[in-house]
Amino acid sequence: MPRDPLATVVKAVDDLDTARAGISRAQDEARSVVANARDHERRARGALHAAIVQAAAAGVRQVDLVRVTGLTREAVRRIVRAGGVAAD
């Protein structure tokens, strides 16, 4: 038995505090990682939309855009119209 029976309790409390702080840090880091990933997704989506509009303006058929992007015809149509390219 230790000389001071409370020493074990104090150590356990310190260990618990350290574990909780680790959880808090991990949650903060995870929030940052998710925010960065969402920002990257927004930029990538914008680049994809711009590329779709540019391709449509250059005469690429909607069916080919659907095949390459995996988007629905309606989604491609909306993107192209929002980009100012009129339907044929």
Image (cartoon, rainbow, N blue to C red):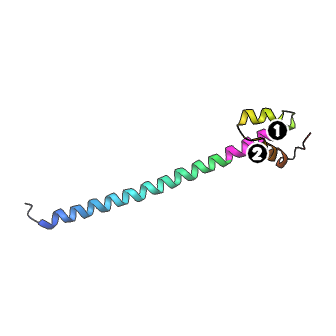
Please name the predominant secondary structure of the magenta segment in the image.
Answer: helix
Of 67 and 25, which appears nearest the observer? 67
Disc 1 is placed on an element classified as helix
Of 35 and 72, the residue lying toward us: 72
On screen, residue 63 above or below 40: above
State how far apart marks 1 and 2 are (Cα): 15 Å
Q: Residue, x 80% and y 34% (percent of image)?
A: 63
Give the position of the C terminus as an image quadrant.
top right
Q: What kind of element bears circle 2?
A: helix
| Mark 1 vs 2: CB contact within 8 A | no
- Tell me which residue sits at (16%, 64%) in the image: 7
**Residue 64: which quarter of the image?**
top right
Task: Give coordinates of residue 47: x percent, y percent.
Answer: 72, 42
Amino acid on which disc 2 is placed:
Ala
For image coordinates 61% across by 50% down, the residue present is 38
**Image location (x, y in percent) of residue 25:** 42, 56
- In the rendered structure, find residue 34 and report the number of the disc placed on it: none
Residue to which mark 1 is pinned: 54
Q: Residue at x 58, y 48 (%)?
A: 37
Instruction: Please report the bounds of the magenta region as a residue range.
Output: 43-52
Find disc 2 in the rendering and name its residue.
75
Give how far across and how far down residue 33 sits, in percent: 52, 50
27 to 88, vertically: above or below? below
Point out the tag, 1 or 2, that comes first from the N-terminus. Answer: 1
**Is the residue marked by circle 1 packed among few (<14), some (14-19), or many (20+) residues within 10 Å?**
some
Position of 9 compared to 48: left or right?
A: left
Q: Quadrant of the N terminus?
A: bottom left
Residue type at the position of mark 1:
Gln
Based on the picture, tell me whether residue 83 belongs to the magenta stretch: no
Residue 29 percent location from the top left of the image: 47, 53
